[in-house]
Every structure is written in structure tokens, then in C-alpha cells.
Amino acid sequence: MMNRTLAQADHEIAKIMAQELDRQKTTLMLIPSENYASRAVMEAMGSIFTNKYAEGYPKRRYYNGCEAYDALEQLAIDRAKDIFRCEHANVQVHTGSQANMAAFYCLLEKGDRILGMSVAHGGHLTHGLDRNFSGYFYEAHAYGLNPETDRLDYDGIMEVAKQVRPKLIIAGASAYPRIIDFQRFREIAEEVGAFLMADIAHIVGLVAAGSHPDPVPYCDIVTSTTHKTLRGPRGALILCPERLADRLDRAVFPGVQAGPLMQIIAAKAVAFKEAQEFGFREYQRQIIRNAQSLAQSLLEEDFTLVTGGTDNHLMLVDLRNKGITGREAANLLEAAGMCCNKNLIPGDPASPAETSGIRPGTPAVTTRGMKEPEMQLIGKWIARVIHDGRKEDGTPNETVIAEVRDQVAQLCEAFPIYEDLI
Ligand code: PLP
């Protein structure tokens, strides 16, 4: 039983995996929170490090036999501190949501007031949505975007902060295409005596590479995922100054978790090493150039972009002038081999299940080596599908969909991924 391959042990899962590999190879991953982890990252994830309990931290474990785990976790910590130029890093948290939970647990008491970006305007569930732990255990208040510009309105946030007097302000978003001014957020936090936390789950790779302003000098805590622009394993990390290090580590363990996923921490270490390499900065710069090129191509096709463009890895397309909802558009695009996600636009009249927008992004296609010319093609194909991909009765126009899907497959073949995996 111990030596069988996956195909030998479980042909059903092996078959599903083969089909998914085919999907990843032959379609375009345009969801901005997704990416292709490297083979080295995946090798660490699927390794013997999964076999060990290592509760605690390097040199302070509750289990014996942790020498290798101390070494790998310390490497991950040191590399994270180097990449993000910070005093302390906790690399144990399993997900971005759990990282935020740990950050709150570190800084707040139950019932404290928090102020985060409204989910309807691009914030994340964990920034205070009522059905999330963040809205359930804390008194959550929200700031939004300026209705004229759809950009963060720092004067407006200052006003809300003065009214709410939160103990914690959260800067960061899941669907905001512009630069976030963390220095301004710090000024607001100082003014009202609040802690400041940045959740850089989306823009983390850009921050690491110096392509987005750095939150670390301005924040008490910075949380992030490791699987989006950072291109590591599905996971998270938390950064803070030395003064909060012990408190934060205790908030993670034993606060919100017991045994760390050591195989994932090993994979995070590998991803951090990749982020220290020269090509990573260029990769992040190309993500932005690609997003701007895709945005320009969509504008030429008469699409409306929230804020008119992008400074980062994603854009928010307002589809209201196209007579199609975000859900319908994402389904049509998927059928044509371009996997996008539907997304609320600021002030969206549609429900979160329907939405009026989509949120294309470029981290994954950039990993495949695509550049501006390919973004121009993708923009044209998105337009073709949205404009001509439905018949008058609303059913998919299979001819158009098949034609685009074929072109997408050819492009994917020209920019292969995971060639040596089966
Ligand atoms: N924070 C932000 C800003 C996010 O966009 C996300 C995920 O999309 C998260 C936190 C949560 O990460 P996870 O899905 O790993 O819990």
C-alpha cells in the first residue's frame, strides 16, 4: 500500500487530476488570485514533511524529532524577512483568512471596533462582513470608494475613522485596480489612535518586487496569502515589527491553530527563494505591463473599466453597457477557454451571485511567458465572446465559442506550462 503511485492507488482521483492538468494547460487562467506554482514548490508540498507534528516554533517545539522542521521553518522565516524587509515573519498560517483571524486575535478583544473596506467596493470578507468571523466577533464598520472616481478617498476614510474610532483599520482589497497609499492610511490610524493592518494578499508579489509601495514601514501587522502574485503554495504569512513578534506568534499558535503544515512551510520557503531570484522582479513588472496592455485592449473594444484602467495585476470590467451580467460573461468566457471570475463593481445594482462585472488579471498568463502582444489578442477574444458569443435567444453561439476556444488553445500551446507533468 505504501509504494503505490497515485494512479495505482486511486485511479478516480488520478483521472480527475489528469483532466485538470489538461484544463490548466489548454485554457487561460485569468483569475487574478490564481497562478501556476513551480515544480519545485509542488515537490515540497507533496513531500515527507507532511508526516510530522511540529507544534510550536523553531527550537521551541512540543514534539520530538523536529530538527529538519526547525531548519526549514527558520529558512522560510529568514527569507520572508529578507523579501519584505521586515523584523518578524510568521509563516505558519494556513490561509489568508486565517492570517487575518490571527492578526485580529493578536491586536483586538472580542467586540472591538474595526474599520475595513466594504466588500461591495472590493474589500475581503475577512475585513468585516457580517457573516464572516470578522463581522461576528468584532463591531465592524466599512469605508468605501469615492463614488465619482471609484478610488480610495483618503479624506473620506479619515472622516469615517473619526466617527467610528476603530481599534483597528484594515487597508487592502480583493478587487481594487489602483495603488494603495499605506502612508495615508498610517496618518489616519495615527489620528484616531488605531492599529493599522495591511492585507496584501493580492498585491504581495508586486510589493515584494518593489512594484507597489511597501506597507511594512507603516503597519503594525501585514498579512498576505502566498499563492496569488507570490506564486507559492496555497497558504499565508504574517509580518510585524519585533515589538509585536511574541504576541503575534502566540495568536497564531496556540491562538488559532495547532499543528503547522510543515510541507507547505517548506514550499513557502522555496517560493520565497524564487522571489529572491533576479527574474522575479521582472516577472512582477511584466504582470503590470500585461494588465495595462489587456486593459487598453478592452478599452479599445468599448469596455468600461472601473477607474478607467489599472496600476496593478487586475482590472474590473463594468459590463453594464454590454447587456450581460458578470455571471453570464464568466460562463461564456470559460466555455471559450478563458477562465475569469464574476465580480461586483462599486455600487453594483446586481446581486453578488449575478454581478455586473468581471475581474480579469494577468499573474498566471505572465507566468506562462505571455507579453503585451498576447494580451492584445486576449482582449480581442474577450470582446468577441462578449459581443458575439450569444445568439439572439440568449443561448451560447457555439460557432463563435468554438472558434475562440481553438485560438486560445493554440496560444496555450505556444506558451506551454507543466510540460513534463503527466
Ligand atoms: N485577503 C484578501 C485581500 C483576499 O483577496 C483573500 C482571498 O481572495 C484573502 C484575504 C483570503 O485568502 P484565503 O482564500 O487564503 O483564505
Image (cartoon, rainbow, N blue to C red):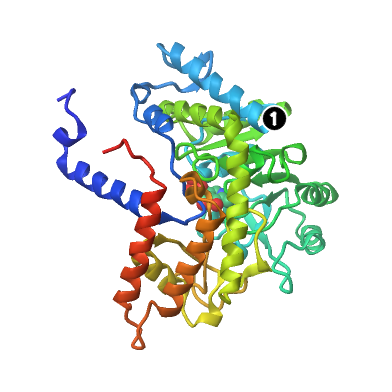
- Per the image, label 1 sits on a secondary structure element best described as loop
| Residue 61 can be seen in this image | no
Quarter assignment of residue 404: bottom left
Q: In which quarter of the image is the N terminus?
A: top left
Q: Nearer the viewer, residue 285 or 155?
A: 285
Q: How crowded is mark 1: few (under 14 residues within 10 Å), some or many (20 or more)?
A: some
Can residue 331 be seen in the rendering of this structure?
A: yes
Q: Which corner quadrant of the image does residue 332 belong to? A: bottom left
Residue 261, relative to residue 62: is it above or below?
A: below
Left or right: 191, with 265 as reference point: right
Instruction: Report the amino acid beneath label 1.
Output: Cys
Point 42% across, 15% down: residue: 63
Q: Where is residue 306 in the image (x, y as percent from the top left)?
A: 63, 69
Residue at point 29%, 49% (across, down): 22
> Could you tell me residue 367's position as x and y percent?
49, 44
Residue at mark 1: C-beta within 8 A of ligand 1: no
Q: Quadrant of the C terminus?
A: top left
Say left or right for 195 vs 39. right
Residue at coordinates 34% horizontally, 69% vertically from top-left?
403
Report how many numbered discs are placed on residues in the image.
Answer: 1
Q: Viewer-proximal residue, 1 or 259?
A: 1
Q: Residue at x 74, y 74 (%)?
A: 148
The residue lying toward the viewer, choosing from 365 and 318, is 365
Q: In this view, does 101 lie to the left or right of 385?
A: right
Q: In this view, does 360 lie above or below 78?
A: below
Residue with the mark numbered 1: 86
Foreground: 1 or 255? 1
Give coordinates of residue 106: x percent, y percent: 63, 37
Where is residue 170 shown, x and y percent of the image? 67, 50
